[in-house]
Image (cartoon, rainbow, N blue to C red):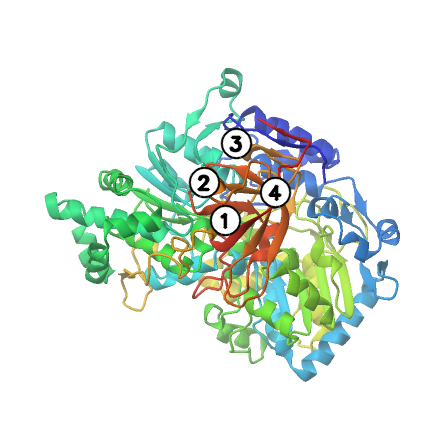
């Protein structure tokens, strides 16, 4: 980790020259290949490749440089000239590598050869693909004879639709629905909440709606770091007079001011755009109360002057309004203020803005979903939109901002532990087998199974599962108990340093690389956050001749571990992805009709969204209001003044568990990630000075001690009673039962913790 630590307030806007400098610094640090600049010109273009980081929409008429700061970092990171090949692993014992931080593990470079872990020597050793598949298959066969439900098939967000379809079929032919994926850790609350209230598991908004919205109500999402290309839509909306109202505990720079780095005029003149017209710093976990307060104010306005609610829409399309109205009217303003952290005047002001806006979008991220009441929170936002008919018309709707590229698409083609979301009868008809009907293991369930020893094998299709999940300590201790662990990856990460009795690390082609099969160069497809499906073509030369494509790896594992099935053409799918797309089309004809032609449509082809047409596929046939069960989670930090609500954060120099560097530019932190952001009043009350070293200790009901030490306290603009620190470092603090009710998403945005002083301020820290 860098030794020079500097804490300095950042005053510049998002984008601008800060973004350019960050790109140049990262390009040099990652040792990107010469092919990188050519690749950037193809990023998110119709004939190019889809970015491997965020899932933001790909426009039909892209910018000349349709990439953002973090998207370019992801490209640099994948096209690095560094290699983690046999020489690297011969020089480093795996146990020693556990002392490396996340950044330096991935900075070792691209994986080049299939590797098998040697327990006796504590090293990874090169192995042939043939031996790898033979042993993996034999071990899976043995476990299947005992109980096929003891194997987990995990998928990260970036695998293509083609690979994902093959992978889910592998799991179901094997005999289980144990298909946890990245959604379980982020937007599963969305996937549970929305079907109940609007009849579909995804948002109702398309990219074009941003041009027609009168107001955007923004909750718990940080586009400046997590989806910077979104700032172009926000800037354009703000410039044309759209009112942007933001609810977020921290003041994120991308939601305050933006200078477009693609605009020569703005760059040369220093011009910047104010993004949020109102910025309300809601308390962590206080969004239900804030939304309820705004709805209460709307009912009050309607009672005084009328004309506020859309009565025609409510009468024709909605169910359950009266119960929700009664709930809102019954809430006292004093309780709403305490729970939300906002004043009554704030909530009434926001409601007035909403009342005079004809078309409104509700946009949100994991700041709503990663709470114990995450499902309820999303449904309360839908209630808010329904009151004025803001679902099912142009310029309006519900807009969850998905994180990882294609994490939404994986669900579309069957990566789900919930059999009711998958056309099992159709799979049975196509492939001549009886699919398992029991619900499989979601991420939290898989973790419990690994800790208890009931899970005997883990197959990871990408990702950094062990680092991304809660309960880090017990998970790392339990992981080696499994009989088999298989990791398909492009780069080294911490999940690869804990290995089962038989363990393989299998390197695959990256999305940016040319995928040449016997039938010719291949294209893959992904789905963006707006439910549009795109083709993606890699153009870079593969970094090693020993890499296999993800479809090929899945096909070979399937052939080695499953009984022969003439109706499942694994080799055809792996050799020609258009055949896999034909299979997807046969399975999901209503979504993927004429798939191989439409995938080339500029801007992608649209997946049907019934709620957009005001077709409600719910149990009532209408959009359903849901009454919140409570205004916040059960723990009460108001009565326990020593307990704060921890919000886990991503820095400007990371995407998910990938750490590109140690400069969180927008928060003014350079050279470290071991910091905790605290309100000045809380620091004074807890007798903590700026720069003091502290320990964060979680507060749970199981009496197990979970703590993270060595963090530097930083005074920051964050609501009282809340604190912030970085993910994934803070996952060690999150118990497995600290998750959203109904969706099991880890509740990482409101973890009850105590801050315990360790020592006075450390020397050698530059602060401004």
Of badges 2 and 3, the one in the foreground is 2
Decide if residue 340 is on the left or right side of residue 155: left
Of badges 3 and 1, the one in the foreground is 1
Q: CA distance from mark 2 to mark 1?
A: 10 Å
**x, y (%) of residue 456?**
68, 74
Of badges 4 and 1, the one in the foreground is 1
Q: Is residue 612 visible?
A: no
**x, y (%) of residue 551?**
67, 60
Q: Secondary structure at mark 2?
A: loop
Of badges 2 and 4, the one in the foreground is 2
Circle nearer the N terminus (4, 1): 1
Q: CA distance from mark 4 to mark 3?
A: 24 Å
Residue on which disc 1 sits: 647
Circle nearer the N terminus (2, 1): 1
Residue that appears at 23% across and 59% down: 327
**Is 680 situated above or below 383?**
above
Circle nearer the N terminus (2, 3): 3
* Pointer 3 local density, CA inside 10 Å: few below 14, some 14–19, many at least 20: few
Residue on which disc 3 sits: 63
Decide if residue 249 is on the left or right side of residue 138: left
- Comparing 336 with 603, the one in front is 336
Q: Which mark is residue 654?
A: 4
Q: CA distance from mark 2 to mark 3?
A: 35 Å
Circle nearer the N terminus (4, 3): 3
Q: Secondary structure at mark 1?
A: strand
- Comparing 261 with 128, the one in front is 261
Residue on which disc 2 sits: 718
Q: Is residue 656 visible?
A: yes
């Amino acid at each position: 980790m860098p030794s020079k630590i500097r804490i300095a307030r950042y005053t510049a806007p998002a984008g601008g020259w800060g973004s350019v400098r960050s790109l140049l610094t990262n390009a040099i640090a990652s040792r990107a290949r010469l092919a990188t600049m050519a690749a950037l010109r193809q990023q998110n273009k119709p004939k190019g490749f889809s970015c491997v980081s965020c899932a933001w929409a790909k426009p039909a008429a892209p910018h000349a440089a349709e990439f953002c700061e973090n998207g370019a970092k992801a490209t640099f990171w994948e096209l690095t000239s560094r290699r983690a090949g046999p020489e690297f692993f011969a020089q480093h014992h795996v146990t020693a590598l556990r002392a490396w931080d996340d950044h330096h593990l991935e900075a070792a470079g691209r994986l080049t050869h299939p590797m098998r872990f040697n327990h006796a020597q504590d090293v990874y050793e090169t192995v042939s693909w043939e031996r790898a598949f033979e042993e993996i298959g034999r071990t899976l066969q043995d476990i299947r004879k005992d109980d096929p439900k003891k194997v987990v098939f995990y998928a990260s967000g970036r695998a293509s639709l083609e690979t994902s379809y093959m992978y889910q079929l592998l799991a179901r032919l094997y005999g289980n629905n144990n298909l946890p994926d990245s959604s379980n850790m982020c937007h599963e609350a969305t996937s549970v909440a929305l079907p109940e209230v609007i009849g579909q598991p995804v948002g109702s908004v398309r990219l074009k709606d941003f041009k027609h919205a009168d107001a955007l109500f923004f909750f718990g999402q940080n586009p400046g770091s997590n989806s910077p290309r979104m700032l172009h839509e926000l800037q354009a909306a703000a410039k044309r007079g759209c009112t942007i109202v933001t609810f977020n505990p921290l003041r994120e720079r991308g939601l305050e001011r933006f200078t477009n780095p693609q605009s020569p005029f703005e760059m040369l003149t220093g011009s910047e755009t104010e993004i949020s017209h109102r910025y309300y710093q809601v308390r962590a976990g206080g969004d239900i109360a804030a939304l309820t307060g705004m709805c209460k104010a709307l009912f009050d306005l309607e009672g005084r002057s009328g004309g506020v609610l859309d009565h025609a829409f409510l009468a024709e399309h909605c169910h359950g309004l009266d119960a929700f109205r009664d709930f809102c009217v019954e809430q006292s303003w004093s309780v709403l203020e305490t729970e939300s952290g906002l004043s009554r005047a704030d909530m009434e002001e926001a409601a007035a803005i909403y009342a005079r806006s004809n078309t409104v979008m509700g946009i949100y991220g994991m700041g709503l979903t990663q709470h114990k009441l995450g499902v309820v929170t999303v449904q309360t936002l839908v209630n808010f939109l329904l009151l004025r008919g803001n679902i099912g018309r142009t310029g309006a709707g519900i807009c969850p901002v998905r994180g990882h590229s294609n994490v939404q698409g994986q669900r579309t083609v069957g990566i789900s532990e919930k059999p009711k979301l998958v056309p099992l009868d159709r799979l049975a008809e196509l492939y001549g087998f009886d699919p398992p009907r029991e619900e499989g293991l979601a991420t939290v369930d898989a973790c419990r199974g690994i800790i208890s020893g009931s899970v005997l094998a883990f197959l990871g299709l990408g990702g950094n599962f062990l680092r991304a999940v809660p309960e880090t300590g017990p998970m790392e201790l339990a992981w080696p108990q499994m009989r088999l662990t298989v990791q398909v990856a492009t780069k080294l990460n911490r999940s690869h340093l804990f290995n089962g009795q038989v363990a393989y690390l299998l390197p695959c082609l990256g999305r940016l690389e040319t995928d040449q099969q016997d039938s010719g160069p291949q294209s893959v497809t992904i789905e963006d956050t707006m439910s549009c499906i795109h083709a993606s073509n890699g153009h870079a030369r593969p970094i090693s001749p020993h890499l296999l494509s993800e479809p090929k790896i899945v096909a070979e594992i399937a052939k080695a571990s499953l009984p022969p099935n003439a109706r499942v053409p694994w080799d055809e799918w792996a050799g020609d992805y258009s055949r896999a797309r034909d299979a997807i089309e046969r399975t999901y004809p209503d979504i993927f009709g004429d798939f191989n032609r439409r995938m080339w449509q500029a801007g992608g082809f649209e997946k049907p969204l019934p709620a957009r047409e005001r077709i409600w596929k719910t149990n009532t046939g209408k959009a359903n209001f849901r009454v919140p069960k409570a205004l916040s989670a059960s723990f009460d930090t108001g009565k326990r003044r020593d307990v704060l609500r921890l919000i886990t954060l991503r820095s400007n120099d990371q995407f998910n568990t990938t750490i590109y560097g140690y400069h969180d530019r927008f928060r003014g932190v350079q050279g470290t990630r071991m910091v905790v952001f605290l309100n000045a009043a809380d620091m004074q009350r807890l007798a903590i000075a700026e720069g003091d070293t502290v320990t964060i200790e979680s507060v749970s009901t199981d009496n197990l001690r979970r703590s993270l030490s060595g963090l530097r306290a930083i005074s920051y603009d964050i609501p009282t009673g809340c604190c912030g620190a970085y993910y994934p470092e803070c996952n060690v603090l999150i118990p497995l039962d600290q998750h959203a009710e109904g969706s099991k998403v880890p509740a990482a945005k409101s973890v009850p913790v105590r801050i315990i002083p360790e020592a006075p301020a450390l020397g050698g820290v530059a602060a401004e």
